[in-house]
Amino acid sequence: MDGSSYYVPAVAMTIALAVKGPSLLRSWRDPLLRSVCTLMALSALVFLFAAPPTIAEVNELLGVTNISAPLVYCLLSAFSGACLVLIVNWRGGPVESTRRTSRRWIVAYGCVVVAVLVLFALGDTPVERLRDFDTHYAREPFVREMIVLYLAAIAVAGVAMSVMCCRWALQVHGTLRVGLLIIVAGYMLNLAYVTTKFTAVAARWNGVDLDRLSTDLAPVLASAGVQVSAVGFCFPLACQRLGGTWATWSTYRRLGPLWRELESVSPPAHRSVRMSWWSPVELQVTRRESDIHDGMLSLYPYFDAALRARVHDAAVAAGSGPAQARAEADAAMVAAAVRARAADPEGHALDTAGRAGSGGSPSGDAERPGPLPSPEGPRDLVGMSVALRRSSVVAAAVRGRFPEPDTGADTHARSREPHTG
């Protein structure tokens, strides 16, 4: 692997960390967010300092031959510990138990880092080795133990992560399960890296030259393992973010029919305020809901509670559920009010709203619904908008083909008709 194979992932992780930086500053006390940012930072540092060009530069800059080796081993060990801490905080549970487990992993891998530095200081590595340090010094006292220690630390992390992720994957579904299985695949590659390194080092102990496994194959496995694991960590979060954005856009789109229905009665001053297309979708949904509420507020005197009740009964009779029937009834009442408002350019209903019932009819204030809440509770704006476009009951009511209620006079007249048969 050349330098670019290391630097490209390092830059990608740095960019991801920069994107997460503002969130970290706002929510520093969030242990999960801290764990994510720590993991991304360590991942970027591992790729940066493991690149052969960087290894040579660090050795020359610090003036200590092969000092890059323990530095990279410490970063790999810290990265392994950070992965364990992240998965512990991600899974959650009792706060004290999560903190205690996290501290144990941090202390354990902190001790590994210290031990790696001490063993390197005790060993003797006079010849600079940029790519084959492990196999070249596999028999050197203290350095040998340092190599085994850091590989063992990575192996323990790989086994622990695989076990925890597999157990958790059996308890969850959807994108989280997929993400956990991707993490397991990444750690299988990490375990393959450790196995390859151990094989090459053990071969050196027995006088056999398998250095190509350590210098050529192991770095590829390590890089692939880190990147696959990173995808596993990001996949559920990205899907959750995309799913939330898609749901918000869907809400915005589904509110369209009701918003357009009420556009003609919205206050002119409010309509003059324009919002750019690149505005956050959440803000656009809020604006559309506000426009709808303002339009419904201006229709207050034209609401016909009797029509709403008839449409509700018809919707229930047609097989609609309670929530859907309420949405259809509200949609029909609003659509009828828009047409009543258009047929009343002089605003007579506005003048009589204080004395008359809904739609200016003398139905009494007690029967007139408020501008926002329906008799059963807050109105379902999305359900109303969908009903305007799809409900045949609402369409019949809007077109004036809905049967009028029987009046008392009609009932009295029918009672006087002669019976036949």
Image: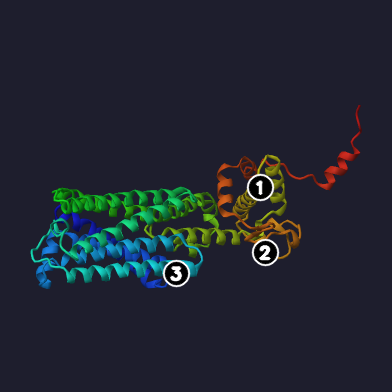
- Circle 3: residue type: Arg
Let me know if residue 349 appears in the view: yes
Disc 2 residue type (three-letter): Asp
**Eye-nearest disc, 3 or 1:** 3
Q: Which residue is mark 3?
A: 100
Closest to the observer: 103 or 311? 103
Is residue 351 found left or right of 144 in the rendered image?
right
Mark 1–mark 2 contact, CB under 8 Å? no
**Residue ID for mark 1:** 325
Measured from the top left, where is residue 84 in percent x and y?
37, 61
Q: Residues within 10 Å of mark 1 (few under 14, many from 20)?
A: many
Q: Nearer the viewer, mark 2 or mark 3?
A: 3
* Residue at 49% across, 61% down: 286
Residue 156: horizontal and vertical position, in percent? 34, 58
382 sits to left or right of 108: right
**Mark 2–mark 3 distance (CA, rounded to whole Å):** 70 Å
Please say whether residue 274 is visible from this viewpoint: no
Give, as a three-letter code, the residue at label 1. Ala
Q: Which residue is mark 2?
A: 351
Q: For the residue labelled by badge 3, is the local secondary structure a helix, a strand or a loop?
A: helix
Closer to the chain start, of discs 2 and 3, is 3
Distance CA(mark 3)–CA(mark 1):
52 Å
- Chosen colour scheme: rainbow
**Residue 40 percent coordinates (x, y):** 30, 62
Of circles 1 and 2, the one toward us is 1
Callout 2 secondary element: helix
Mark 1–mark 2 distance (CA, rounded to whole Å): 31 Å
Work out which quarter of the rendered image holds the C terminus and state it: top right
